Image (cartoon, rainbow, N blue to C red):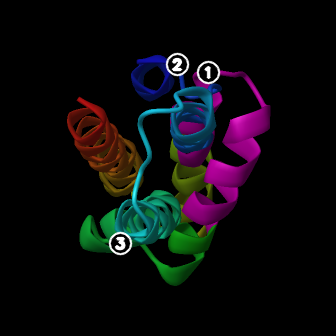
Amino acid sequence: MLAFVGLIKPIIPSVLVLWVGFLIYQFGFHNQHLSWVFYVSMALLTILILCADFLANKYFVNRFGGSKFGEYAALIGVVIGCFVLPPFGIIIIPFILVFIVELIQGYSFERAVKVSIGSIVAFLTSSIAQASLGHKSLKKQQ
């Protein structure tokens, strides 16, 4: 359940919390064991989730008409946003960086705002993907 809090308060690394929960479940309950198939599928989903955080920003900034530099600004913004202004930095920093980069590229104010909104859409999409991983893991443990 704590991993779901990480979706709302992004400073909590929800995927890491899920793995701690898996290990506590595996080694804390003697009569319940998770299979290797479970761990392999969760490892693959974890890799997918981690890539989704970065690639979603790149994809949606591009999809909303951003430049290559805007895409890279979104990626850098996600990393910086994890550490600056938690928990809101992961939303605000990519938005601001993409906005500034697009203005520097010569785009209009309106277009820079539109492209920056792509970074917010990316965050929401990534959160939905993380929620599905958490839901799958909770369903498996029941």
Secondary structure state at the residue bearing disc 1? loop
Residue under label 3: 59
Callouts 1 and 2 close, C-beta under 8 Å? yes
Per the picture, the main secondary structure of the magenta-coloured stretch is helix
* Residue drawn at 49 percent across, 18 percent down: 2
Q: Is residue 137 above or below residue 6?
A: below
The picture places residue 48, in percent across and down from the top left corner, at 42, 68
- Report the Cα–Cα distance between label 1 and label 2: 6 Å
Q: Which residue is mark 1?
A: 87
Residue 80 x, y percent position in the rendering: 75, 46
Q: Quadrant of residue 105?
A: bottom right
Q: Amino acid at mark 3?
A: Tyr
Q: Where does the C terminus fall, quadrant-wise?
A: top left
Which image quadrant is residue 63 in? bottom left
Q: Please tell me which residue is depicted at 44% across the width and 67% down the height of the picture.
A: 36
Q: Nearer the viewer, residue 62 or 138?
A: 138
- What SS does tag 3 mark? helix
The residue drawn where x is 52% and y is 50% is 99
Q: Which residues are magenta?
A: 73-94
Nearest to the observer: residue 46 or residue 72: 46
Residue at numbered disc 2 = 9
Q: Tell me the CA gap for discs 2 and 3.
A: 23 Å
Secondary structure under tag 2 reads loop
Q: Is residue 110 left or right of residue 19?
A: left
Which of disc 1 and disc 3 is earlier in sequence? 3
Residue 100 visible: yes
Looking at the rendered image, the disc whose residue lies closer to the viewer, 1 or 2, is 2
Give the mark, 1 or 2, whose residue is nearer the N terminus: 2
